[in-house]
Image (spheres, rainbow, N blue to C red):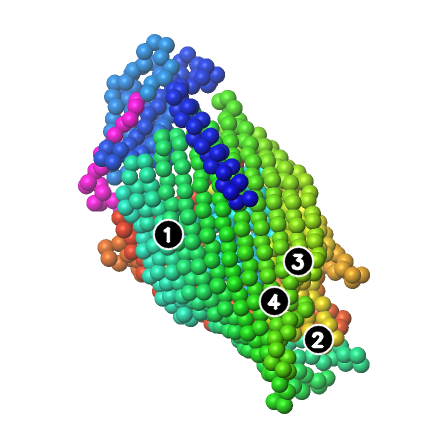
Amino acid sequence: MNFRITLTVISLLVFSFSWVQAQDLEPDYPSTSSGIDNKDVLIKGRIVDQESQEPLEFAAVSLFSQSDSSLITGVTTDLNGQFELKASLASPFYVEINYLSFENKTLSNLSIANGQRVLDLGIISLSENSQVLDEVEVVAEKSSMQLQLDKRVFNVGKDLANLGGSAVDVLENVPSVTVDVEGNVSLRGSENVRLLIDGKPSGLTGPNALRQLQGDMIESIEVITNPSARYDAEGEAGIINIKLKKGSKKGVNGSFGLTTGTPDNHGLSYSVNFRRNKLNLFSTFGLRYRKNPGGGYNNQRFLNDAGEWIGFNTNQDTRRGGLSGNFQFGANWFINPKTTLTTSFLYRKSNEDNDSFVEYQDLDVLGNITALTTRTNDEQERELDLEGTISFERIFSSKNHKLNVDFKVFQNEETATGSYVEQGPLNVAPILQRSDNLESNYNYLIQADYIQPIGQNGAKFETGTRITLRSITNDFLSEEQDEQGDWITIPSFDDQLKFQENIYAAYAIFAKESDKFSYQLGLRAEYSDMITELVRSNTVNDRNFLNLFPSINLSYSIHDEDQLQMSYSRRISRPRFRHLLPFFNLNDSRNQFSGNPNLNPEFTNSFELGYLKYWEKGSLLSSVYYRHRTGVVERITTINENGTTIRFPVNLSTQNAYGLEFSLSQDITKSWSLTANWNFYRALTEGEYEGVIFEADAVTWSSRFMTKLKLFKSLDFQTSFNYRAPRNTPQGRSLAVYNLDMGFSQDILKDKGTLSLSIRDLFNTRVRRSIIDLEDFYSESAFRWRNGRQITMTLTYRLNQKKSRRGGRGGNRDFEGGFDEGF
């Protein structure tokens, strides 16, 4: 299968390249249907660096009347340095080109011959201004939060609380995003969110990989709460896209980082690129050693056969972590000004030793300790990720007319071994157990997207197709030593799970933008073929289904400062692989977790209304949303006769959820800014499992407040506060979680370096607490992956890069009609 897929992709790329080369033989003049009348002229050209002949993107090109120097129109160059502008010209004119740190250039006394419709200025070279290069230090920088009606972009590298942290730490500081103790990511109260890396599925989105991925490899986080048909239909709550750093500036430049902290958190990293002529090379690297002390407790009470309340207390101490590393290398080949081929390779490896000590205190009806049992666990996890990507882009007569073809393959190999010793009373022999878990994950993705503008009235048609092939094998074996010293297989912990998931998708979108009103109509079809097989149990669950996913986006611009949007989409949430695993974890013999190989997908109809308001120094995004879900997966807890709990997921219920969300960004002064987010959420859940009714009315809210202050010319101070209110669950409730983070940064080495200090969870309050309250069972539990506050110091050195000094307008305005271009 691997050979056929690779051959198909290579053939597709060769065909595309050959076709593009043929297209390049034809001039790119506008057709007679381009909309240019007899008085309008198309003026085009390309701006390059005089020394290197590399294109200069985002150079300003302005067209002036020669007679009175009045501005006629203007435009900026694209990523290939090209520009096109249309104007009605009746007299001589001149063109000015401006680019930061380059000499301005003026083309004077230009004119148009009678009947001439196109004026090609050809290649225009600009030379660097050495004096400006030495003096420029103040440039606009990206806001930490950029608000758009279809998504929010968080430039997480600017958040001092993220320095020295992992991808999980970064996500925990994104408004409306939470991460639980098991590493599951939630958005607006729902775990059914699609995680992507650079717009594509990746092996780096698993809970373990996110904890090991260094935060300083991340450029930004994009949160898309109601995606269009262009995106995967996966993810009831939306999409979280993690964008990794990739440089593309000319010459050699980059940044290097060194981190140390307590508890053990040490690492080094770099992000560099080299660009010359038609080739750009980029690379990122991170090496990290981390050990997290954690733990918690679980106090359980249950009714015995005599109707009396007895129980036990569980106290657990953990120490998790080890050495992990990430390396990425890639290249952009600018074949010609309109054709780009990109390749990249990513390698990640980790070696972790995870130890835990569990103490059980058995209690009688009076709460007295009747027995004491301890359990010592020693686990080793070895994980390897490999990813390869090939992307092809062809831009036609305009930047909005393009074809993208992508191929990606990634594989994951994970081996986990463990040894367990449970010791009861001294006169009883200890229980010795061991486990071996081998998991292999192979994924292939082929995708093509095409965008075709229609006429000159802002309309466009999009279509695309995507094939995702996924194959996972998990071989799990647990054994226990008998009295003779022989290792005997534990039946309920011995099986091999094979999971095959193939998804074939196609979509079509029609969109039109105008000065005031824009709309987008889309339809996506996905055929899913899923097979779950328990080999030793000889159990096979074969499912396939075809589903349609419509999407509607409406946008209205009240005026330049106010934007209104309404959207609808239908979504699907397929079972996660780890939710299908039927194997228990041996870490805690009295509180066990397992999956369910018979889980079915959830379906969601999602509606959202958003209002985006700008003013001089700030912006506010207000949203109202509603979601109706069927086949909702909930984790429920069952109790056996000795009080041991088993927690597993089932398709339990239907759910109606609605909420309000506000995101504020404000520059109070030139040196003081703040961002704030508040999300109110209510979910009504109704369901039944094995004759038991499960209902919950969850009313909760969460908020994040961050303020940043420049104390002196080169010293920044930041503090942020996160709060998540209590919420009800079908069997109990989750209690409040809150924490305060703080950070300082000081520029050094003539602004080529920055020294930063970050303190996470200053008052040691980030604890996950929950209650289960049933007629015959009650428990209170608390757990944290990392005990105590974390203090981290980071040194960053910039090579041929200038640090930005001035913040942009609060919440950068990136809205252009309200519809994203996709990944």
Q: Label for residue 535?
A: 3
Q: Is residue 291 magenta?
A: no
Residue 601 image offset from top left, x and y in percent = 67, 49
Q: Earlier in the sequence, mark 3 or mark 1?
A: 1
Using a 10 Å C-alpha cutoff, classify the residue at mark 3 as few (fewer than 14 neighbours), some (14 to 19) or many (20 or more). few
Residue 446 image offset from top left, x and y in percent = 52, 40
CB atoms at circles 4 and 3 under 8 Å apart? Answer: no
- Residue drawn where x is 30% and y is 30% of the image: 47
Q: Earlier in the sequence, mark 2 or mark 1?
A: 1
CB atoms at circles 4 and 2 under 8 Å apart? Answer: no
- 736 relative to 159 in the view: left or right: right
Q: Which residue is mark 4?
A: 477
Using a 10 Å C-alpha cutoff, classify the residue at mark 1 as few (fewer than 14 neighbours), some (14 to 19) or many (20 or more). many
Q: Earlier in the sequence, mark 1 or mark 4?
A: 1
Q: Label for residue 284?
A: 1
The quadrant in which residue 308 appears is bottom right
Q: Is residue 755 above or below residue 609?
A: below
Q: Label for residue 760?
A: none
The quadrant in which residue 369 appears is bottom right
| Kind of residue at disc 4 | Leu
The quadrant in which residue 231 appears is top right
Residue 555 image offset from top left, x and y in percent = 56, 35
